[in-house]
Amino acid sequence: MRVLAIESSCDETAVALFDGGSGELLAHRVHSQTDVHAEYGGVVPELAARDHMRRLPSLTRATLTDAGLGYDVIDAVAYTAGPGLAGALMTGAAFAKGIAASRGLPALGVNHLEGHILAPLLGDDPPAFPFLALLVSGGHSQLIEVREVGDYRLLGESIDDAIGEAFDKSAKLMGLGYPGGAALSRLAEQGDPTAVPFTRPMVNRPGLDLSFSGLKTAVANAIAAGHAHQDVAASFERTVIDTLVIKLTRALDQTGLDRLVVAGGVAANRPLRQRLVEMMADRRGAVHFPEIELCTDNAAMIALAGYRRLAAGERDAQPGFRVRARWP
Ligand code: KG4
Ligand code: ZN
């Protein structure tokens, strides 16, 4: 089964062609709208939807051309149905359902977060089930027990800002542009991670929930107090990573799991990857990351998640489409 997948939940337009039988990703393309939104300092939903609409047809043709294949090889269409920006989701869903309807193909709306969690299955070292997933993106920070595809238990999540959001807001305070997570991490390489003694949020409270809005405020205060930006960046990054290590240790102890998957845009963070590799080596467990380019939003992960469900017989019930801006 060859699955064409469309991702348009936020500010990346993405298309992938995946061969479920061989597990081979035949081609995938991502067009980032960063330039469209940069001058506004954040994603403008209406502009995002319009740009998806503008890009999807040519991006889809280009993806098929990369694979050396045509529309005739597609057996099913998967698309991100949520969570995300409603208008942005609708353009992708309408486009995907249009292709499916015109060619008489089955279609399935996929949960974007499930895509992120399953992205490491596309790599050379796919994790076995069950595993603990740490999903850290611009919109979400969650700890999830993953027993099988489709069998998830939310163990804890951020009660306010997502980690990527905290990175982005802190980066903005340092004048690093938007989205500034990766730029903040680069700046942190030149700083002293012990320079600013930030409190690690929520670690003294029981449970697995997270909180990052207080840390963001502490970053603003540290900058106002005159600390060098690179020191604030390094201390912030170290505090976030320390906090995650404490919570993950707790979650692994509690569930008895010895495999960890880290996914979402913040999984591209190199110091985080390094610390979690060390942590899992100490525990004699294993940690799996998606390929760096599959950490941030892409359609390959939507194709994989969609394929797994389509192969199990799932299909959209209705010919129209329904997107879910919120999809717990
Ligand atoms: O998964 P993603 O592409 O989009 C969402 O679904 O949110 O994640 C984007 C987030 C942004 O907040 C971005 O700043 C952050 O991931 N990010 C990073 C790094 N690369 C991307 N954060 C910290 N360090 C990085 N290297
Ligand atoms: Zn995402």
Image (cartoon, grey):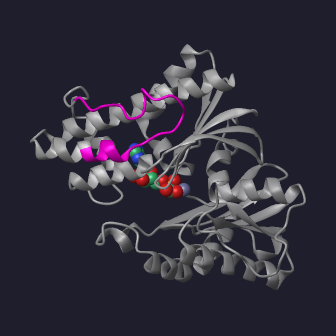
Residue 271: tell me if it is visible. Answer: no
Q: Quadrant of ligand 2?
A: bottom right
Residue drawn at (33%, 36%) of the image: 237
Question: How far across and how far down the image is residue 261, in percent?
Answer: 61, 36
Q: Is residue 124 left or right of residue 263?
A: right
x and y, in percent, of residue 235 in the image: 27, 33
Provide the major secondary structure of the magenta segment. loop
Decide whether residue 213 is among the magenta residues: yes
State yes or no: residue 67 in magenta: no
Q: Is residue 306 above or below residue 59?
A: above
In the picture, which quadrant includes the N terminus?
bottom right
User: 50 above or below 108?
Assistant: below
From the viewer's side, name the closer residue of 15 and 142. 142
Q: Position of residue 109 (x, y in %)?
A: 73, 67
Q: Is residue 306 above or below residue 163?
A: below
Q: Name the residue nearer the viewer: 6 or 223.
A: 223
Residue extending farthest to the front is 205
Q: Which of the 4 image quarters holds residue 221?
A: top left
- Among all residues in the image, which is located at the extreme bottom? 102
Q: Is residue 192 above or below residue 96?
A: above
Magenta segment, which residues?
197-217
Residue 248, image quadrant? top right
**Which residue lies at the image location 68% right of the left edge and 46% below the top edge?**
118
Residue furthest right as drawn: 313
The residue under the point 64% across, 46% down is 117
The C terminus, quarter of image: bottom right
Residue 193 visible at all: yes
Q: Is residue 119 left or right of residue 230?
A: right
Number of marks: 0
